[in-house]
Image (cartoon, rainbow, N blue to C red):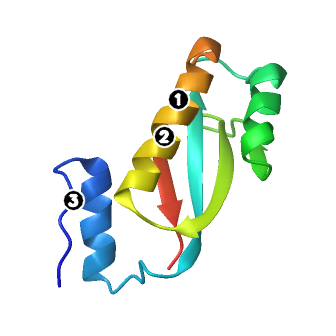
Amino acid sequence: MKSYWPDDADGDVMRQLEASGFEFDVEHAIDFNIDFEKWPPSQQFIDQLKATYPVVEINPPEGDSAGDVRFFVEAKLSYELVKFVQESVSAIAKPYGGWCESWGVLH
């Protein structure tokens, strides 16, 4: 039975994963990225993020790529989870010039 997701970028990824046979019923390491207007991110923000998501990577800019902060969630992948994490982390990151709009999962 096919699932239905909203017509947005996150829904598009869910549809692609489903088409490739992704197992939504088992837990995966889902990584989320936080981008910032200015680098480096505030240590106060990093501390707040680690209070909820202890596995955090800080990736400074290299060459043409902007730096980002990556954190991981071990869970069953769902559209609702992705939206909740992105929105809640973006709310925390906004005062520091950050936002969370991208994520990925290895399969």
Q: Residue at x 73, y 36 (%)?
A: 49
Q: Residue 10, how many percent across, how many down?
A: 32, 52
40 or 74, which is in the foreground?
74
Number of numbered labels in the structure image: 3
Q: CA distance from mark 3 to mark 1?
A: 21 Å
Q: Which mark is residue 86?
A: 2
Q: Which mark is residue 5?
A: 3
Q: Residue at x 51, y 67 (%)?
A: 105
Q: Is residue 66 visible?
A: yes
From the top left corner, tell me how far across and down residue 98 is, in percent: 57, 24
Foreground pick, 37 / 51: 51
Q: Quadrant of residue 19?
A: bottom left
- Is 97 rendered above or below residue 105? above
Residue 92: quarter of image: top right
26 to 91, vertically: above or below: below
Give the distance between the C-alpha atoms of the residues marked 2 and 1, in whole angstroms.
6 Å
| Residue 59 in view in this figure | no
Left or right: 5, with 41 as reference point:
left
Residue 2 picture location, percent across and down: 17, 79
Query: Element type at marker 1?
Result: helix
Circle 1 residue:
90
Q: Given contact means CB atoms under 8 Å apart, are the residues at marks 2 and 1 in contact?
A: yes
Task: Give the mark nearest the N terminus, 3 or 2.
Answer: 3
- Give the class, few, some or many, for how many residues have Cα within 10 Å of label 2's Cα (few <14, many ≥20): some
Q: CA distance from mark 3 to mark 2?
A: 16 Å
